[in-house]
Amino acid sequence: MRQRAQAIIIRDRAMLFAYGIVSSDNELRHSFIGGGIEQGESPEEAVLRELREEAHIDGRIIFKFNCEIAENHHTFLIHIGNQSCRLGTDPEEEHLALEERNLKDLIWILFEDRHLFTSIDKEYIERLIEECKEREYYPEWIVDI
């Protein structure tokens, strides 16, 4: 199974997600920005490349999760400052017509809209809180999440 790198991005009491078709079931859903790690690329390089490709932003890695939820995943907490995100492309899907590509939009889900988080989102949020505590890293949003 291919290795995947993904980014958790939090700003203004909200989390950033890519929105599009999930290939396994053809449903429109949100997921963390990320993708496959290319040959010779580190997970750190991959997650930063995916941010540039899918959201046209540069990120700074705060930390990589020590304990992953999904096998073959590398999850990173990423800081993007006040950059504006805009929909990019998913080069892995460039062979498809624009309307058929997986990535449809970028969305921010507010913490107060918890009902929009999926069960996997909630698992990652719980893991994120644990990872922050293990590192004694307490950003201002930790009490709100």
Image (spheres, rainbow, N blue to C red):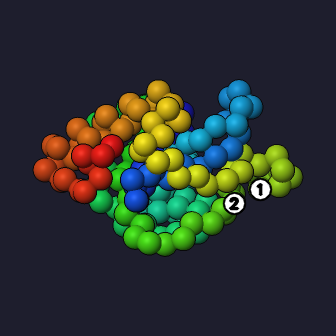
- Marks 1 and 2 close (CB-CB < 8 Å): yes
Q: What amino acid is at disc 1?
A: Glu
* Mark linked to residue 89: 2
Q: 18 or 110, which is in the foreground? A: 110
- For mark 2, give the secondary structure: loop
- Whether residue 40 can be seen here: no
Residue 127 position (above or below residue 101): above
Estimate the x, y position of residue 94 in percent, counting from the top left.
77, 56
Question: Which quarter of the figure is the C terminus placed in?
Answer: top left
Q: Residues within 10 Å of mark 2 (few under 14, many from 20)?
A: some
Estimate the x, y position of residue 15 in percent, counting from the top left.
45, 50
Q: Residue furthest right?
A: 97
19 to the left or right of 82:
right
Please report the residue visible at 59 percent of the width from the left and 41 percent of the height from the top.
30
- Whether residue 45 can be seen here: yes
Q: 13 or 106, which is in the foreground? A: 13
Please report the residue visible at 53 percent of the width from the left and 36 percent of the height from the top.
116
- Counting residues from the start of the chain, the first of labels 1 and 2 encountered is 2
Residue under circle 1? 94
Question: Which quarter of the figure is the N terminus placed in?
Answer: top right
Indicate the quadrant where residue 67 lies: top left
